[in-house]
Amino acid sequence: MHAEYNYVVTAHRPTAVNFAQLCSFTSPTDRNLILGKNSYLEIMLVTKDGLVSLMDVPLYGRISIMFTFRPRGDYKDMIFICTERLQYCILEYDMRNRSIMTRVGGSIHQRP
């Protein structure tokens, strides 16, 4: 008996943009373009000379919902993401460490 197996892997990062938000994510004075590309988040800085890529963030899952918001009393925006498998997170940029941290995350379960 001969068994045939296929191994499927994504060789290239997604290029199609599914979501785009303009906000102040990295600092109160920065204007950032946040792009949701399938299972990646691309964060860009908007400057007078054009766009500067700051970071690409891989996500575990495909983005189905993405929006930015600013909590009351806060000075910069956060990102809410929900995946196709109903996993969610709220991301915040840490200006000291220059990295993204997960403020909260979990799973959304529908109950009867």
Image (cartoon, grey):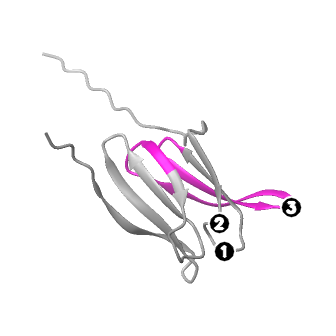
The vertical placement of 103 against 61, above or below, is below
Residue at image x 50%, y 38%? 11
**Mark 3 or mark 1, which has the lower sequence index?**
1
- Label 3 packing within 10 angstroms: few (<14), some (14-19), many (20+): few
Above or below, 15 relative to 109:
above
Quadrant of the image containing the N terminus? top left
Q: Position of residue 41 (x, y in %)?
A: 54, 52
Q: Secondary structure at mark 1?
A: loop
Graded by Cα atoms within 10 Å as few (under 14), some (14 to 19) or many (20 or more), the crowding at tag 1 reads few
Calculate the distance from the C-alpha at mark 3 to the C-alpha at mark 1. Answer: 17 Å
Q: Tag 3: residue type?
A: Lys
> Which percent across, then down, holds residue 34?
61, 54
Q: Quadrant of residue 43 in the image? A: bottom right
In magenta, the rendered stretch is 37-66
Whether residue 45 appears in magenta in the rendering, the answer is yes
How far apart are the alpha carbons under marks 1 and 2? 6 Å
Residue at (16%, 43%) from the top-left corner?
A: 111
Q: Which residue is mark 3?
A: 48
Q: Amino acid at mark 2?
A: Ser
Q: Residue 78 in the image: state x and y as whole percent.
A: 52, 65
Q: Which mark is residue 28?
A: 1
- Work out how far the residue at label 3 is from the one at label 2, CA to CA, in angstroms: 15 Å
Which residue shows up at 65% across the image and 66% down it? 24
> For mark 2, what is the residue?
24
